[in-house]
Image (tube, rainbow, N blue to C red):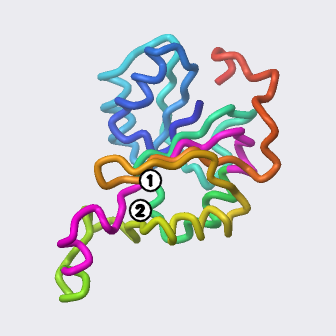
């Protein structure tokens, strides 16, 4: 698994602890340094890097984008790049919803700051998220709304099942 934008490393660590081979990466070097000190596991590698550049060689079965997409301006291009660089069979995506609370649309309409975080480029409606996934040439395999967020399994249009081989943890 590749956890892009792993931040403090907790999710990557928990996935490794449950048996996955995980590479967690973040563009913020200070976050990676702190995560490396806090989370150590034989199935976990935490690295500083930019997902828009070919960060890791090889194929990842799963790429995790947990609270990442909303921070990016060119999300469709980013999703295409992730698919081209890492060839995952599955993207696990978690993003905040615009309609998480009735006050959010009201604040936006009134011209009051409405985003959860000032670094958010967007907060999604179901329609805007679905549109971006389609524009990237991807499909939603599963979607649910939890606590004002979209939790989604996304696959490439050519998805036909899990690849039989994968790189060993040691090479990740």
Relative to 102, is 149 above or below? above
At horizontal 45% and vertical 48% (from top left) the residue drawn is: 144
Q: 103 left or right of 14?
A: left
The reply to whether discs 2 and 1 touch (Cβ–Cβ < 8 Å) is: yes
Is residue 87 one of those drawn in magenta? yes
Write the start and end of the magenta stretch as one range: 83-106
Instruction: Depth check: give the residue in front, 46 or 87.
Output: 87
Q: Quadrant of residue 96?
A: bottom left
At horizontal 82% and vertical 48% (from top left) the residue drawn is: 158
Q: Which residue is mark 1?
A: 68
Q: CA distance from mark 2 to mark 1?
A: 6 Å
Q: Which residue is mark 2?
A: 71
Relative to 17, is 55 above or below? below
Residue 21 pos. (x, y %): 58, 20
Instruction: Depth check: give the residue in front, 132 or 46.
Output: 132
Relative to 163, is 119 above or below? below
Residue 137 pos. (x, y %): 73, 62
Residue 147 pos. (x, y %): 29, 49
At horizontal 40% and vertical 43% (from top left) the residue drawn is: 29
């Amino acid at each position: 698994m590749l956890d892009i934008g792993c931040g403090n490393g907790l999710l990557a660590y928990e996935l490794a602890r449950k048996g996955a081979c995980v590479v967690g990466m973040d563009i913020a070097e200070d976050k990676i340094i702190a995560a490396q000190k806090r989370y150590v596991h034989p199935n976990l590698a935490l690295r500083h890097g930019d997902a828009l550049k070919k960060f890791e060689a090889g194929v990842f079965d799963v790429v995790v984008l947990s609270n990442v997409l909303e921070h990016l301006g060119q999300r469709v291009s980013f999703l295409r790049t992730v698919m081209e660089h890492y060839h995952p069979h599955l993207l696990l995506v978690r993003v905040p919803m615009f309609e998480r609370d009735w006050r959010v649309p009201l604040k936006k309409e009134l011209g009051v700051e409405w985003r959860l975080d000032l670094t958010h480029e967007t907060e999604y409606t179901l329609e805007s998220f679905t549109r971006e996934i389609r524009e990237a040439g991807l499909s939603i395999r599963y979607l649910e709304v939890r606590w004002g967020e979209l939790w989604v399994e996304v696959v490439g249009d050519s998805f036909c099942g899990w690849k039989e081989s994968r790189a060993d943890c040691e090479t990740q």
